[in-house]
Amino acid sequence: MGRWTFGLTFIWKVMLTLGLVLLYYCFSIGITFYNKWLMKSFHFPLFMTLLHLIVIFLFSALSRAMAQCCHQRPRVVLSWADYLQRVAPTALATALDVGLSNWSFLYITVSLYTMTKSSAVLFILIFSLIFKLEELRAALVLVVLLIAGGLFMFTYKSTQFNGEGFALVLGASFIGGIRWTLTQILLQKAELGLQNPIDTMYHLQPLMFLGLFPLFAIFEGLHLSTSEKIFRFQDPGLLLGVLGSLFFGGILAFGLGFSEFLLVSRTSSLTLSIAGIFKEVCTLLLAAHLLGDQISLLNWLGFALCLSGISLHITLKALNSKGESGPKPHKGPVSSSDLELLLRNREPGDEEEEDEGEKYFVAQGQ
């Protein structure tokens, strides 16, 4: 009887994990192809990002209100001093990361975007060393070399390479390194109470909107004001279709963060990291099959080299976490490049799962 119960429990955990991974894949891969699809007909990526931020903020506020009604506990609200001094730098870096990433879809293929965005791990490591969140070790140097070498091989003599788009997404990866490092520092300040991902999204979105709006006004404001798809529309049906598509993208962005949270809260951060690697492989295969992206053997070898560097980094993190006795402050990133929100790290069966002081970690992806 005991073995039968254990077998059912094991099967249930496996099915639950697979279901959560598939949910995460739907949102993550979906928003990547959504961005590329929308950019073919709607050439205003910064405006799209601003609307997505509004949708995420509204859903975060709604989630906070529902959680407060269910648990009868007030949600954290930061003072203006803490909000502007401690959250603003992280929000600005996040806005630039997401904005430049979406902007790059105007010029590059999904495969080149996926490969280049995976280099965010490299910049996260570099800034973790600069801010002394990581200690310089030979293994980390090897990780950096593998990722950098893989990126070079993937872009070398690529037939669909675009310099402008590559520069945008590489700049987003660079800023992403700053973003996740600042976010980690922000989360380690337990007195702020932003360990819950919904609370973090709620506080970040307004400052992200304000940080990205000047860039939108400079590069897209005039063109959008004269566009027949928005302000000078003549067909109300076309306008509603565009706004509906933009709103759907906001739902995908919020769902991505929430699906990551569910996956980690029910399994572990290692599961999310491994799932992220296979997700990138699936994205490249779908891009080659559905969109006709041309990927040569050298490109695939470069991608494999980059993934080996990311896998080595994840393995080292897993070994370090097993070697720690007792809870310690989390150091360094543990996720792949494509993930995007703050996720709760807890093991199944832990009696202290609901403790608000538990650590969350960073994961990106839009």
Image (cartoon, helix red, strand yellow):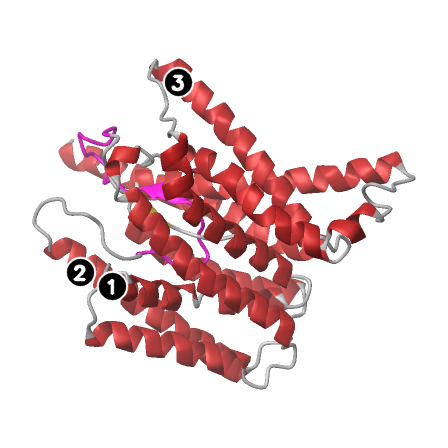
Image quadrant where residue 192 sits: top left
Looking at this view, name the residue that lies furthest to the right.
234
Total numbered badges shown on the rendered structure:
3
Q: 323 left or right of 92? A: left
Q: What residue sits right under mark 1 in the picture?
A: 315
Residue 77, numbered label: none
Residue 319, numbered label: 2
Residue 320's spot in the image, x, y percent? Answer: 16, 59
79 or 110: which is nearer to us? 79
Q: What residue sits right under mark 3 in the picture?
A: 68
The image shows residue 43, relative to residue 199, as above or below, that is: below
* Dominant SS type (magenta): loop
Name the residue rendered at 60%, 56% in the picture.
Answer: 102
Magenta residues, start to end: 334-355
- Report how far apart the C-alphas of labels 1 and 2 lie in the structure: 6 Å
Q: Amino acid at mark 1?
A: Thr
Residue 136's spot in the image, x, y percent? Answer: 21, 71
Q: Amino acid at mark 3?
A: Gln
